[in-house]
């Protein structure tokens, strides 16, 4: 360590102080272990595809008050919890019937560009009054973002030739 000292009547001179370097004088130090793992992503869905492109189709067998369980077609996905939507640090899963996802897709794709801000404002009001840190609020917040931006406008048309029959 280098320090400056002013002595009486003399100019400033540099005084070097050197600590003892003997092993007895230096306490043993251990370096903390080096973490080679990648840092945890703070927003797990930040780089995820848009909502509808993350859907995982499935069939649930549910009791609808009949004697036998009935199949229900639907899909699940991961959404951010609460009012931050896809930008939330915590996530949860949500399963909805196919008709609900179809409705969500219609809201996103069929809203005319000149009405997108108005529809998003309404959905945002609904989401803000739901509050809480749950998956439904997270889904609604993500829906608000997608109504505003329509992330599907550049998605190419699906090819019916991939199937033997398409209705």
Image (cartoon, rainbow, N blue to C red):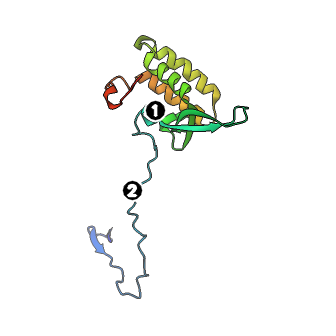
Residue plotted at (56% across, 42% down): 92
Q: Position of residue 13 (x, y in %)?
A: 26, 70
Which mark is on residue 51? 1
Nearer to us in this view, 64 or 14: 64
Residue 81 shows in this picture: no
Q: Is residue 73 left or right of residue 112?
A: right
Dot placed on the residue nearer the N-terminal end, 2 or 1? 2
Residue closest to the far front: 164
Residue 152 lies in quadrant: top left
Q: Which numbered disc, 2 or 1, marks the residue closer to the eye?
A: 1
Secondary element under disc 1, as helix, strand or loop, is helix
Whether residue 165 is situated above or below residue 7 in the rendered picture: above
Whether residue 165 is situated above or below residue 40 in the rendered picture: above
**Local crowd at mark 2 within 10 Å, few (<14), some, or many (≥20)?**
few
State the CA–CA distance, disc 2 to disc 1: 26 Å
Residue plotted at (44% across, 36% down): 54
Residue plotted at (59% across, 38% down): 60
Residue matched to label 2: 38
Residue 63 shows in this picture: yes
Nearer to us in this view, 11 or 4: 4
Of the 4 image quadrants, the one containing the C terminus is top left
Q: Position of residue 15 (x, y in %)?
A: 30, 74
Q: Position of residue 74 (x, y in %)?
A: 54, 33
Of the 4 image quadrants, the one containing the N terminus is bottom left
Residue 27 lies in quadrant: bottom left
Whether residue 38 is situated above or below residue 33 in the rendered picture: above
**Local crowd at mark 1 within 10 Å, few (<14), some, or many (≥20)?**
many
């Amino acid at each position: 360590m280098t320090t400056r000292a002013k002595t009486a009547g003399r100019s400033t001179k540099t005084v070097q102080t050197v600590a003892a370097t003997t092993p007895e004088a230096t306490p043993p130090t251990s370096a903390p272990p080096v973490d080679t793992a990648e840092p945890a992503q703070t927003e797990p869905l930040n780089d995820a595809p848009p909502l509808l492109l993350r859907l995982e189709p499935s069939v649930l067998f549910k009791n609808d008050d009949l004697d036998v369980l009935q199949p229900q077609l639907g899909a699940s996905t991961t959404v951010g919890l609460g009012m931050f939507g896809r930008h939330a640090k915590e996530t949860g899963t949500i399963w909805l019937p196919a008709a609900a996802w179809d409705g969500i897709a219609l809201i996103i794709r069929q809203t005319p560009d000149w009405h997108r801000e108005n529809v998003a404002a309404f959905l945002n009001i609904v989401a803000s009054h739901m509050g809480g840190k749950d998956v439904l609020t997270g889904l609604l917040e993500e829906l608000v973002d997608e109504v505003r931006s329509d992330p599907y406008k550049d998605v190419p048309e699906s090819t019916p030739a991939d199937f033997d029959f398409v209705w």
